[in-house]
Image (cartoon, coloured by chain):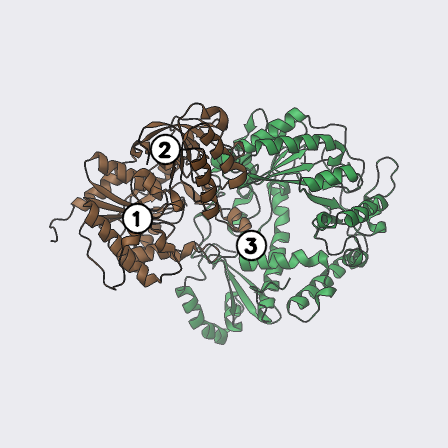
Amino acid sequence: MMNKKGDALVYPYDINFTPILRHSRLLANCTITKLISPEGWGLTGKDAACTDGGSDIGISISNSFEEELNNCNTVIFASSERKLDFDGVILQKLMLAGKAKKKVITLGSLNKIEFKTVNDFCIKNEVDIDFYGSAIKERISKSIDYSEDSLHRINTPIIFVLGSGNNTQKFEIQLLLREFLLNNGYKVAQVGSRDYCEFLGFHSFPQKMFSTRINESKKVIFFNRYIREIERTERPDVIIVGIPGGILPFNSDFTNNFGFPAYIVANAIEPDAAIFSTVYEDWSDIYFERLSTLIKHKFGFFIDAFNLSNAQVDWNNSRENMKLSLNILDWKFIEQKKKLLSNSKVPVFNVLNSAKSSDIAEYAVNKLSEEEFEVV
Amino acid sequence: MKIDTPFIHLFKTPGAGYVYDVNTNSIFKVKESVFKYLSGAANEEENNDAENTLTRMRKQGLLSTKRLETIIHPASDMLPYYLENKLEMLTLQVTQNCNLRCEYCPYSGSYINRRHNNKRMSFEIAKKAIDFYLQHSKDNDYLSVGFYGGEPLLEFSLIQKCVEYARNKAQGKEIKFNLTINGTLLNEKNVEYLIKNDFQVIISLDGPEEIHNKNRKFASDGSGSFKTVISNISKFNEEYPEFFGKVMFNAVMDPSVDFNCLNSFFMSYDAVKGHNAMFSPISNEYLADSQGERSESFEQDVSYEMFKLLLFKLKRLSKKNISPVVKAYFEQVRKVFYKERVPVEQLPDKGHHGGPCIPGVMRLFVSCDGLFYPCEKVSETSEMMKIGDLDKGYDIEKVRKLLNIGQLSEQQCKDCWAFRFCHLCAASCDDLESLSSDKKLSRCQSVRDEAETLMKEYCMLREFGYDFEEDAG
């Protein structure tokens, strides 16, 4: 693990890293100062916020990796939405960083060969490297005994963060909640929806939940025991669980894994508060009402707060390329639309409005405190 | 249709009567009494027979009278964001010159458009256009740059420079290049270059010699270009079969020619058969004079081939009998009425008819001078179609107008059952200085006729048990 704070360069920077940038105070050991993206991504010269459509961040994106390497002591290889060729691009830049004696951090998934290549290079060249993502084995998962079929009770309040699908600001909300709760003196345990959350000081969603070797019932038991183990060892005041993916198919072409991860988690543990982040469309209040009802019937809990994300599905592009394609709209546009939803029975927020981004966290925490009597 | 009547369209195939329910975007086969009731032609006995069915249909949310309240394209609100981030394809007009003078070319003088001339795009303008594209395509995973003319191969060295520049700038994204050419200027050097850079090439080829040469003639002496084109195609097909296997042909169908001759050429001529081909009619947008003669048998021959295609789909005819010319027709039926027609609960309050792309987003056509147009099909002399330039960027208000052509015919569109299947775009309304509602409305009936024909084909195929999930090839 890192043992000194340093100026860090992020490559390749894109929308996936932006939530981390917005909550970089959660990073104990580095300060992000440089953001590099390939020139073809159309981000060069723009503010870092151009990726997620949120309020400006104040760091400009560059395309000159080698030049900026001189201005940092840590290089973070991010897990980007758009994948770059490993051998031709990532490895070359990693080697440059290693030879320049920079500390290296990898967040992206590496297969066995890629991991070995990088690891061998780093050992040979004495490069200080921290691996995250699927390259590391989860410590807790291995110790979980899920042979019995019963569920354990979780006594610590749990907040769920779920959404319509990927890239709908779920991770932004998870980090926002974490930062808010930590700043207010709470002890937070967290399981995030990405596979490199250890970089931010909490647990990643366990890989076992995607394994084809365990049936769905066992996954329910496993996840229940997993959360119980976190509760037992960390003794938190609150547990945040970010659920990867979406809760429902969009249609017959884009099935979103049929919402299985959410269904398994909802059977394993019960939330005390739940936040749902929806893709953008010109929704009316009725949509949120129906969505609440659907989630209650399908998963067994109510949604306490909605986030209207700025990610809109581009159906033409998606159908043409058979891959879900999103339009990323501006936060101010969402703010205008959100105002029209003020009559929604469940409040609707816009987390990208930096002036009000913590409102959703405050609301969720107040929800947890609302109980007039405490179950013991 | 009156506003208090169900918003539906009634039609019949030889086998049954159908209701297209506009609100739910659903098609229902109905019994005769219901059909007659809805068309106002039922007698008392038929009325009584239809009552129960109609009650059940209404309970399921069908037969609603709701129309759109406001005609506005759903992308209007978000136009700035689309224009800033979603530019899908860039087309560079590298030259306005051509070594052919095709009779039906928009630049031949028969159309209200510029004429062929020596203007060419400078590399400076090309670079600026490529930079603009990269800056405005952040939310797209792929880049696509096309080269157009005139005849783009007249500017082969400019194309080479553009490709190199674009590749360097586009690092981190896959970039594809495409080219539409007349086929007369292919040589070893440019073919090898096109192969090396994995170009998607479209070659204009109208049919066998007599048909091709009727319209596609050399500028120098007015002679037909067929022999040169076919010689190049045959030669390079043999030398580079893998690359040429992916070449697409574009045939403009002159309705005065012998369709069977044209059809037989694309089915059996060695260098051409088996290739993907697009067949399009001679454009009637911006025509200076009325269209030329039409052969009596042309339409009948086309219809006959469509009929054979449907028989093939129903497994009554072998694939080898099927004309490539009409292949796209079935795909249209499948795409529009099976794949993309998604049932909904009801019409929204606001909407717009199908047809317009988002100008300057789906593609951006940049002229030699650096002016922006929505595509190569519009007239470059039209003030309405200039949607910006490289210096000032997009003219958002112009783009918004071209997007919202439904507002030219608001009342008619609100009452039109076929509005989802409309394909009219701004080019259909352009009278160069303004967008004309009269011009637009003059096209509406043919849009409805086409939509109904496709709908009937879809229903008839279902009657015969065709399985649209099956890819019959």
The residue drawn where x is 61% and y is 50% is B444
Kind of residue indicated by mark 3: Ala
Could you tell whether B233 is left or right of A32 in the image? right
- Residue with the most extreme front position: A124
Which residue is identified by label 1?
Answer: A139
Rendered hue of chain B is: green
**Quarter of the view holding residue B431:** top right
Q: Which chain comes out brown in the rendered image?
A: A
Kind of residue indicated by mark 2: Leu
Q: Which mark is residue A250?
A: none
- Badge 2: residue crowd in 10 Å (few <14, some 14–19, many ≥20): many
**Judging from the image, what secondary structure is the residue with disc 2 in?**
helix
**Judging from the image, what secondary structure is the residue with disc 1 in?**
helix
Q: Is there a contact, CB below 8 Å, between mark 1 and mark 3?
A: no
Which residue is identified by label 2?
Answer: A21
Q: Residue under mark 2: which chain is it in?
A: A
Question: Sequence-wise, which precedes: disc 2 or disc 1?
Answer: 2
Which residue is identified by label 3?
Answer: B418
Could you tell whether A3 is left or right of A90 in the image? left
Q: Position of residue B135 (x, y in %)?
A: 53, 31
**Judging from the image, what secondary structure is the residue with disc 3 in?**
loop
Can residue A157 be seen?
A: no
The residue drawn where x is 35% and y is 44% is A170
Identify whether B25 is placed above or below B230. Answer: below
